Image (cartoon, rainbow, N blue to C red):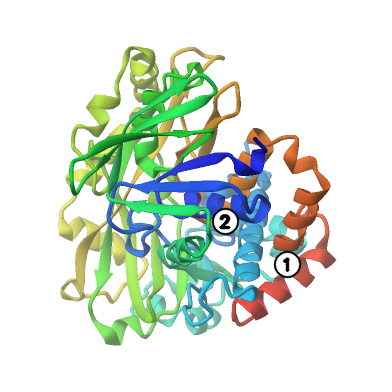
Amino acid sequence: MKNTEKTYALIGAGIMSATLGVLLIKLMPKAKIKIYERLNSVGAESSAAWNNAGTGHSAFCELNYTPELEDGSIDLSKALKISEQFEISKQLWAYLKTEKELNPKIAFINDIDHMSFVWGKENREFLKKRFDAMTKYPIFEDMIFSEDPEQIKKWAPLMMKGRENAKDIAVTRMAIGTDVNFGAITRGMINYLQTCDNVEINLGYDIKDITKVGNKWDIEIENLETEEEFSIQSDFVFIGAGGGAIPLLEKTDIPESKGFGGFPVSGQWLKCNNPEVIKQHEAKVYGKADVGSPPMSVPHLDTRMMNGEKALLFGPYAGFSTKFLKNGSYLDFPMSIEVHNIWPLISAGWKNLSLTKYLVQQVFQSMEDRFEFLQKYYPDAKIEDWELVEAGKRVQIIKEDPEEGGGKLQFGTEIVTDKDLTLAALLGASPGASTSVSIMLELLHKCFPNQIKSTAWQEKLKEMIPSFGNSLIEDGDLLRKIRANTTEVLKLEE
C-alpha cells in the first residue's frame, strides 16, 4: 500500500489538527484522514477567540521573549524565531485565501498596533536597549520607540488619560501587528477539509484508548451521544488535543511518553462593557510580567475583533485549576499522575516555588486587586465598566531533567514521537496557535523525513509557503516581498 493511501487519525479539532490535515491532504491527496473531537464544535477550546490572547504572537510586543542577559545584552533568539514562524503561518493562510479554500468573506485577521509599555528608569533603559537590538533585523525594522508623552497619547490615548507619571514611561510600536481569531481560522480550514473526498470530521467522540497492534494503531472511541463504542485502525496518529494531549499520550504507553507531566494554569480576563471606552483604544499593549509568573500571564490591554465586533480586554489573570481543558474534568490533573512522572512533578514544583506563590496570590485576588492592576495601564478606568470572564486553560509541560535530576518546567511546545514515527503528540501552550504552521512543518520533518525531501513535497510546500527552506531573519528582501503579498491577500493595512 502506498504511503498516500494510508489512514491518518488526528485527535482534536483545534488549529493544530486543522493545519496538519490541510498540509497532509495537499501533500498526499489520496491520504485518508479522520479527525475526532470530543466537543460538538471545532476550535472551541484553546483555539477559541475568547480563550486565547489572539495576538498573532509575532514577538513585536512580548517582552518575555527578549530577556536581558547578565552581561546586559538582549537575547533575541526566541523573538526572532517566533516572529519568523508567524510570517510562515500568514503565508499558508494567504495561500488558502488565494485558492478560495478559506472563505474570502470571513475576516479572521485584522490590523492592530502592537506596543510594549513600561515605566521606571530601569525599564525604560531596557526597552530602548531592546529596540536598538531588534531594529538591526529586517523583521523588526518598522519598530518605533518613544518616550514622548504627546506621541504616546496619539498612539494610545486611553492609557494616557489621568496619568500622573506621563514622563516616566516608554513605548515601542509596530504598526504591522495583528489580531487573530484562531477559532475562525480553524473553522475555515475544517470546512475546507470537509470538501475533500478522503477526509472525515467526527464531532462528539471521545478517545478511550490508543494501542499499537502490529504496525497499526488501534483507537477505541466512544460516540458521546449514543454511548456506542467502536475501534478504528490507523497507520499514523496525531494527538493535538491541547491540554488533553498528556492523558491521551499516556494511553499509548510508548516509552517516549515516560517522564512527562502537565501543570494546568487557568486564565481570566477583565472585559470592558462600555462601548465609549472600547472605541478609544485600538492596540495590543503588553507590559512586563511579574517575577515568577507564567508566560501566559504577561499583562496586556488588548483590542480584539470578535466576529466583526470590537472588544477590549485586560489580563490575563492566572489561576490554578485541576482541569486540563475548559470543558474538562476536575480529575484531569490527579488522574494524569503516574509512577513515571510523580517525581518530575514534585521536583519541578519545588524548583518553581515562585510560580506556585504567584498562582496562589492570583487565585485569592479580589476584584478590587485585579482592577488596581488595570489602573496601571488605564488610570481613569472605572470598575463598573469591567467584568471578570473566564479565559482558556493551558497545560505547561513538566519533563524529566537529565542534567539536574528530577523534573523541570518547560514553557512553549514540544512534539513527542514514537520510535517508529507513526505517532506524534503536541504538548505545551503559548505561542502555539500563532506558530501552528511551523510546528506542523516540524512534525512533517520528524515523522516524514524521506517524503519531505522529495521533489514533489518540496515543490508543493514552496507553493503554499514561498519562504520554505529560506530564512526570513537573514533575507530582508524576501521578507519584505512576502509581507507585502500576505498583507494584500489578507487585507491588512500597513
Q: Secondary structure at mark 2?
A: helix
Residue nearest the observer in this picture, 148 or 354:
354
Q: Secondary structure at mark 1?
A: loop
Residue tagged 2: 22
Quadrant placement of the N terminus = top right
Residue nearest the observer in this picture, 348 or 66:
348
Give the amino acid type for the residue marked by disc 1 in the picture. Glu
Determine the residue positioned at 43% across, 48% down. Answer: 35
Give the amino acid type for the residue marked by disc 2 in the picture. Val
Residue nearest the observer in this picture, 104 or 109:
104
Q: Quadrant of residue 348?
A: top left
Cα separation between marks 2 and 1: 32 Å
Give the percent coordinates (x, y) of residue 303.
40, 73
Asked if residue 432 lies left or right of residue 473, the reply is: left
Determine the residue positioned at 54% across, 14% down. Answer: 402
Give the percent coordinates (x, y) of residue 329.
20, 39
Q: Residues within 10 Å of mark 1 (few under 14, many from 20)?
A: some
Q: Residues within 10 Å of mark 2 (few under 14, many from 20)?
A: many
Q: Quadrant of residue 304?
A: bottom left
